[in-house]
């Protein structure tokens, strides 16, 4: 019996040893509150459903299972394991090995149990009040957690009940990824049917939120099955979860069709709109403040959070009683910060203003000789979210801004910056610095200390819905999409960013430009332009790593150099970076030292040489690394759980 109880409490599938009070953290405490005597009214179901909210965002999220605390941290969501920021992640390096425990296995199943309790009690409810909306919330978040498990592990055990120590499910094998997807879709269908329409833009899950999330799931799985297929499934008898499909499992075509349909329904609903400052002097910089908005003191426009109707699913933080409590700004930004440092590949992906095309494919291409060449004629997703050399910026703390300081220097119309705010220049004197400094999701709030931030986290926003629509339509068109569909999706993002709209004719022009700029034949397609747009729009929102996986291109993308700023021109002469110096603090400051070139230089398509930050020899991404290994403790407790292939 001890062995069974140990298995029950240690495995995150069950979590029954956790006290009942742990599942009612958001409820009003009572002396006799238990699962047995609660759930007697619609109000109690409503409050219990709130305790199932479990979006992963900036703030740490923890659950304690059998005395062990498992914590998911924001530092896991900065596009790690991708090609657009520097750094070596264990997955891309091919060094990930099976470990005793996995935080996300335990954390997700702990959250799932909370949802299952609410759903089970709903089945037992005999009252006359409608509790379907509360059950919809619980089923939405059960789907949300299973989708996280699916992305990480593939097929996992499906648990839809709160189990006891004698439950046979304790020793059940893994369900296939397809069975998990079917459960996710069914739960989201229930949520879509029973949730209310968006009304308050306050972080509560709405019907449109469930639709948008289902569209994300459908696009992910539809393209995974198209490009990755069964290569990560294993046979289900000696390794992996196998490839068993439910009899009514949707086809790839039907998943993509529904993804486009759901996205379109949200678009035409008129419930959401892209954040902008259209018609004001601040159009070119407003995009930056979508991601650090707290109140009228945090942006030059004087906007409050109620201005933001772009976030469909979000986590609402605030400075007064729900601070993020993580050092987001200094982790993602700060002058010459290595964390989340942007690669030259990412810099080249941002569209140019004249033709809406990526830098090397654009008429606006002008090489890399001057520090500012790569910033000229680029859309505002670059110019407002990456620091431009020579420009002055506020930064959270004593050199931050509020309404008073913005009135004197607002980046656009007045420029009386405080003397402590000095021009930014990239300092590339040692290894690890790309020379491109992020501003997205970084606060400028005056007198804030570390971890004071209170802006909302975008779980899923309207811009992604446009991108889902465009990609799904293009996949359904076998790599083609109408100009009309581009105009109702991606081109709305270009309009906001101040870059030209693209069309099918843009593809031929892009390849002609590439030939003129590099001397090489281009291979741009409209599908590649759509994929490029996802990287640009959703940077730092933890979607790029999963995009590389579902497109089946992670090996190619990740087994490559992560390179930074350009040091030599195609003719072999030094760029301005090498020769530039400025006076700062009474000293002459240079920007570059050969000590930074530990790994040498990468030759770009145009013949320029960029500083290698992480050499391709540091990476060994393989197909097995598309999934994480199942934690060994779970396999020891339940031998029916077969390890993922290759581990």
Image (cartoon, rainbow, N blue to C red):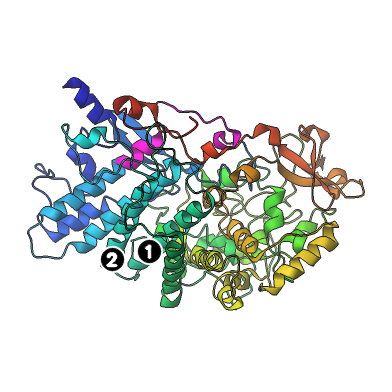
Identify which residue is drawn at 11% across, 58% down: 41
Identify the mark at residue 421; answer none if there is no mark. none
Residue 503 position by quadrant: bottom right
**Which residues fall within the magenta stretch?**
89-109
CB of mark 2 within 8 Å of CB of mark 1?
A: yes
Residue 517 vertical placement versus 96 (above, below): below
Identify which residue is drawn at 30% across, 50% down: 142
State the separation of the CA atoms marked 2 and 1: 9 Å
Report the quarter where the N terminus lies: top left
Crowd class of label 2 (few under 14; some 14 to 19; many from 20; radius 10 Å): many
Residue 597 vertical placement versus 374 (above, below): above
Residue 640 at what x, y percent from top left? Answer: 31, 31
Residue 472 vertical placement versus 243 (above, below): below
**In the structure shown, which secondary structural element does the residue marked by tag 1 occupy?**
helix
Q: Residue furthest top?
A: 2
Q: Which residue is mark 2?
A: 195
Foreground residue among 169 and 566: 169
Residue 217 at what x, y percent from top left? Answer: 42, 56
First in sequence: mark 2 or mark 1? 2
625 in magenta: no
Would residue 199 be found to the left or right of residue 494 on screen?
left
Residue 592 position by quadrant: top right
Identify the mark at residue 209; answer none if there is no mark. 1
Residue 293 seen in the current view: yes
Identify which residue is drawn at 29% across, 45% down: 112
Foreground residue among 603 and 249: 249
Foreground residue among 526 and 351: 526
**In the structure shown, which secondary structural element does the residue marked by tag 2 occupy?**
loop
Would residue 55 be found to the left or right of residue 161 on screen?
right
């Amino acid at each position: 019996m001890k062995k069974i109880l140990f298995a029950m409490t240690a495995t995150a599938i069950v979590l029954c040893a956790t006290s009942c009070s742990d599942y009612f953290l958001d409820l009003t405490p009572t002396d006799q509150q238990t699962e047995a005597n609660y759930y007697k009214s619609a109000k109690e179901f409503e409050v219990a459903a709130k305790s199932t909210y479990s979006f992963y965002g900036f703030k740490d999220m923890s659950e304690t299972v059998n005395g062990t605390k498992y914590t998911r941290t924001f530092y896991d969501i900065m596009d790690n394991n991708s090609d657009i920021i520097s750094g070596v992640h264990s997955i891309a390096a091919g060094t990930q090995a099976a470990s005793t425990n996995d935080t996300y296995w335990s954390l997700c199943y702990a959250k799932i149990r909370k949802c299952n309790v609410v759903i089970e009690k709903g089945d037992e409810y005999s009252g006359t009040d409608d509790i379907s909306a509360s059950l919809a919330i619980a089923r939405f978040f059960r789907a949300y957690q299973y989708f996280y498990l699916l992305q990480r592990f593939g097929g996992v055990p499906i648990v839809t009940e709160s189990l006891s120590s004698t439950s046979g499910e304790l020793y059940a094998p893994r369900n296939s990824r397809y069975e998990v997807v079917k459960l996710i879709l069914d739960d989201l269908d229930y949520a879509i049917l029973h949730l209310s329409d968006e009304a308050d833009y306050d972080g509560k899950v709405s019907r449109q939120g469930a639709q948008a999330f289902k569209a994300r799931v459908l696009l992910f799985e539809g393209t995974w099955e198209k490009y990755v297929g069964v290569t990560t499934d294993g046979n289900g008898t000696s390794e992996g979860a196998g490839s068993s499909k439910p009899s009514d499992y949707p086809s790839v075509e039907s998943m993509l069709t529904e993804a486009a349909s759901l996205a379109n329904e949200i678009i035409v609903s008129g419930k959401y709109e892209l954040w902008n400052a259209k018609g004001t002097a601040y159009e070119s910089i407003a995009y930056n403040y979508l991601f650090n908005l707290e109140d009228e003191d945090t942006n030059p426009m004087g906007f409050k959070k109620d201005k933001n109707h772009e976030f469909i699913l979000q986590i609402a933080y605030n400075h007064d009683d729900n601070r993020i409590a993580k050092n987001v700004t200094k982790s993602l930004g700060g002058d010459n910060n290595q964390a989340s440092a942007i690669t030259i590949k990412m810099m080249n992906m941002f569209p140019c203003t004249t033709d809406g095309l990526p830098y090397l494919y654009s008429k606006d291409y002008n090489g890399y000789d001057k520090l500012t060449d790569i910033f000229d004629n680029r859309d505002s997703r670059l110019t407002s979210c990456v620091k431009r050399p020579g420009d002055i910026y506020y930064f959270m703390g004593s050199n931050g801004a509020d309404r008073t300081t913005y009135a004197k220097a607002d980046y656009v119309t007045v420029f009386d910056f405080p003397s402590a705010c000095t021009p930014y220049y990239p300092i590339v004197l040692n290894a690890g610095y790309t020379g491109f400094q992020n501003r997205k999701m970084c606060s400028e709030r005056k007198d804030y200390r570390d971890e004071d931030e209170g802006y909302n986290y975008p779980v899923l926003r309207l811009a992604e819905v446009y991108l889902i629509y465009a990609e799904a339509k293009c996949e359904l068109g076998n790599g083609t999409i109408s100009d009309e569909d581009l105009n109702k999706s991606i081109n709305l993002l270009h309009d906001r960013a101040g870059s030209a709209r693209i069309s099918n004719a843009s593809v031929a022009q892009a390849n002609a430009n590439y030939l003129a700029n590099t001397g090489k034949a281009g291979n741009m397609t409209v599908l590649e332009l759509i994929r490029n747009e996802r990287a640009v729009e959703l940077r730092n929102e933890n979607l790029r790593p999963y995009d590389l996986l579902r497109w089946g291109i992670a090996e190619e993308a990740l087994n490559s150099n992560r390179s930074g700023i350009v040091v030599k021109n195609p003719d072999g002469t030094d760029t301005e970076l090498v020769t530039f110096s400025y006076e700062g603090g009474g000293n002459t400051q240079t920007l570059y030292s050969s000590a930074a070139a530990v790994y040498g230089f990468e030759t770009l398509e145009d013949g320029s040489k960029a500083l290698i930050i992480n050499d391709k020899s540091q990476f060994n991404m393989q197909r097995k690394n598309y999934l994480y290994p199942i934690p060994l403790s779970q396999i020891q407790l339940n031998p029916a759980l077969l390890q993922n292939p290759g581990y």
